[in-house]
Image (cartoon, grey):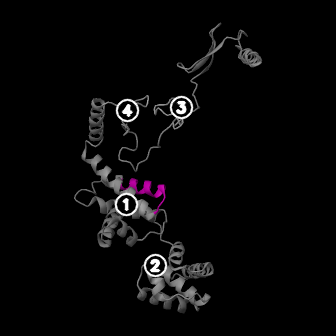
Amino acid sequence: MSSNSNFSRLLKQERSSDRCPRCGKPSVVTDGAGAETYCSHCGLVIKEKIVDQGPEWRNFSGDAEKANKGRTGLPTSIAIHDQGLATMIGSTNRDASGRALSGSARTTVERMRTWDRRSQVHESADRNLRQAFSELKRFSDKLTVSEAVTEKAAYFYRKALERNLVRGRSITAIIAASLYAACRDGEIPRTLKDVAAVSNVKKKDLARSYRLLHREMDFKMPVADASKCVSGIASRAGMAEKTQRRAREILVMAKRMGLSAGKDPMGLAASALYVACTLEGDMKTQKDVAEAARVTEVTIRNRYKGLRSALGI
């Protein structure tokens, strides 16, 4: 009894606070369909174009505990062939109440799914994007790059497709070259050899595709910084933190003296690490560093000699 009286009192207080600013009567009504608040006595519109910021309370899964009450779905992305704007028929053979579909209804829904998939890729460009972005997702996962790099690679590929650069060429090679260009643009330490390994494309073909994109699309790429390659090489070789710090100091001095111009960043970083190993007493051989950096021992020896003589170490 007391709970009912408290509820009535609170309801009365709420109604008394919602009074019309013109006539002063507690006759304010909120119309959800019209998205406005008005006075039912004098007709004054108090608020209009009201947006409901709350969660979506409708439940289509049949399970109240597992219901997704979020109002929005996945964000749009240019790394999806339809940018995530197309409709999709779910794979669960259940109706809105959660009951299993009958055999005839299941056959009908499966036929609708088939036609839905076919209608989304009715043009050759859509089929091309669908195949390319499927491979892009796989390459990005293997290289462990961020979503921003994947989006940039998708942007490069879409531009290449608009300029007919993909026609007559391998889709895999062009999307791999776009991913490498996105890594270069974001200064992510991924080499041609790394991208070629995950995409199963020859390094020569990948380099040719990248040069094509660079020449035809005329984008400016920042100069690769060898210091960003130090952490990956040192981690694979099991080097100490003080060795990494000394290697970065050596690379900074080499850059100031102009020794890094035209040099492979990975080979230069590996040579600086080997110099740091000899200075810090970190017992690593040239073979260990070369295998960690995926370069030859000859490269390390040549860069090692040049660094020590130029820097006077």
Disc 3 versus disc 4: nearer the observer: 4
Quadrant in the picture for the N terminus:
top right
Residue 40 lies left or right of residue 190; in this view the side is right
Classed neighbour count for the residue bearing mark 1: other residues with Cα under 10 Å, few (<14), some (14–19), many (≥20): many
User: What residue is rendered at 30% in x and 53% in y?
Assistant: 131
Residue 145 belongs to magenta span: yes
State the mark number for residue 56: 3
* Image coordinates for residue 184, horizontal then vertical, percent: 44, 65
Classed neighbour count for the residue bearing mark 2: other residues with Cα under 10 Å, few (<14), some (14–19), many (≥20): many
Q: Earlier in the sequence, mark 2 or mark 4?
A: 4
User: What residue is rendered at 60% in x and 82% in y?
Assistant: 243
* Image coordinates for residue 21, horizontal then vertical, percent: 71, 14
- Cα–Cα span, label 2 and label 4: 56 Å
Mark 4 secondary-structure assignment? loop
Q: Earlier in the sequence, mark 3 or mark 1?
A: 3
Farthest residue toward the top? 41
Disc 3 versus disc 2: nearer the observer: 3
The reply to whether callout 4 and callout 1 are in contact (CB within 8 Å) is no
Q: Disc 2 designates what residue? A: 293
Residue nearer the viewer, 103 or 172: 103
Q: Disc 4 designates what residue? A: 100
State the mark number for residue 178: 1
Magenta stretch in the rendered image? 144-157
